[in-house]
Image (cartoon, grey):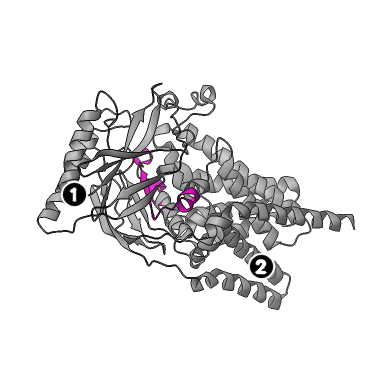
Amino acid sequence: MLLPLRLLLAALGGVALLLAFPGYDIWPLAIVGCLCLALATAGAKLWQGLLAGFVLGLTWYTAMFTWAGTYAGPAPWLAMSVASALYPAALGGLLALLQRRGAVRPVVGAAAWVLMEYARSATPFGGFPWGRLAFSQGDSPLLGAVSWVSVLGLGFLVALVGGLLALSVQRLVRGRALSSLGFAALATALTFAPLLLPRPTDGPTVRIAAVQGDLPTDYTRTLSAERGAMLQRYLDQTQALAGAVADGETAYPDLVLWPEGASDLDPVSTRSGQEAVGAIQEVVDTVQAPLLFGATSRTADDAPRNMVYQVGPGEGLVAEYQKVYLAPFGEFMPLRPVMRHLSPWVDRIPDWDAGAEPGLLPVTLRDGREIVVGLAICFENVMDQATRDLALGGAEIVVVPTSNAWFGEGHQSVEHLGISRVRAVELGRSVVHISNVGVSALITPDGQVHGQTELFTTDLVQGDVPLRTETTAAVHIGPWVPVAAGLVVLLGLLTVRRGTRR
């Protein structure tokens, strides 16, 4: 295959992968993207595979990550896209080595995809695993498999189906129609087989009221709004909820949730804590249900902490969680001396203080039941270990409080909700995804989305969702998926080497 055709296939694969994700939601195109890269690298030289993978990654990520430049400008967005494209470049090189004889190898190719996604999840600076194949599959029949094989394992299945279809195309081009049909049939069967897997949604229910407050009119990323304006929005909307309950327009909630950063007053500071907690306590007592809310507080060294606090009726502050997994370039700044040349925003981003314990909060509901709420603040729901720790720690429901105000009208918010959707099925838990500006929703353990809001609106998401304690197979198997993939790739490289010697 001529190099221009390889690069064209790679670019088409990048476009297909982009369109597979939320915002476009054409899930089969993730399979097509994997197919394109498999064909582009089959029989290629190492450098051709590297180049094809880079073209796919650059096409894909540059378009996907446009939201990263909303406030930071084009330089950080392009730098992020190029850096991310290095991982598909390495994948393309690895596929070229594995397929140097010219035939697509679906199993080892899918394993190579797993290694690439695992590398993106861990490096650099703790990883940035946004845009993994599994997160495009919210509407796919493959989604049911994620509770058995984990997010990385679902990515393996997507790439495997793509590889089988690529092999089918190769066989068809070579005049082997029956063989081509067989591989296409196998790919189809693998795609739809997970529909037979159960997605349990039974269990006692809890009534949630999640408040999406939007931003004050004069609020900007430089925090120029009047002090306390953000908190007041949430107080007013929760007070309105209490009024609706009192008038019989809606049922009492068991638990009220506000998003990340809902209080712009630090509830534990000597300067504003008493004012903030007093106002929050008043509205909690009125609605007669516990509240979890996000706020920023400070350490003794004045480093910011991303926190969720719990306030109970008549109890004041009763518990807290400090975010553990911080977002690189958002909550800490790697390579600060270099990065400040790319954006004027760099020195406005301090290095936040990270917590040490998983986000597990015991909560006494309005009716007296005691449950364990799992918290994954914003970026944490994309981190496998963060969400796995919640399930292993006994969380009966997962809450994802987030702030998406940085990213404007782009697809970041719906992509983030899509991640929570896949996590709900993977963990077998209801997920409450509550954003300050949208989109927000309730997600049941079968991956169904309920009450989804619009961007930059004031809204209230209410509903009953099930509580569950059963641990899925994915929670236990997940850490071993990249290990197994590594062994498969190693075996594949050894077989290629032996064949070359012969």
Q: Which residues are magenta?
A: 388-414
Sequence-first tag of 2 and 1: 2
Q: Amino acid at mark 2?
A: Val
Q: Quadrant of residue 262?
A: top left
User: Does 83 sit above or below residue 454?
Assistant: above
Q: Position of residue 231 (x, y in %)?
A: 23, 36
Nearest to the observer: residue 204 or residue 49: 204
Residue that mark 2 sits on: 169
Residue in the image at 38% along x and 63% along y: 448
The residue indicated by pointer 1 is 288
Say above or below: 436 vs 201: above
Would residue 225 be visible to someone looking at this image? no
Q: Residue at x 23, y 47 (%)?
A: 458
- Residue 263 lies left or right of residue 49; in this view the side is left
> Amino acid type of disc 1?
Gln
Residue 413 on the magenta span: yes
Q: Find out whether residue 350 is within the magenta segment.
A: no
* Quadrant of the drawing holding the N terminus: bottom right
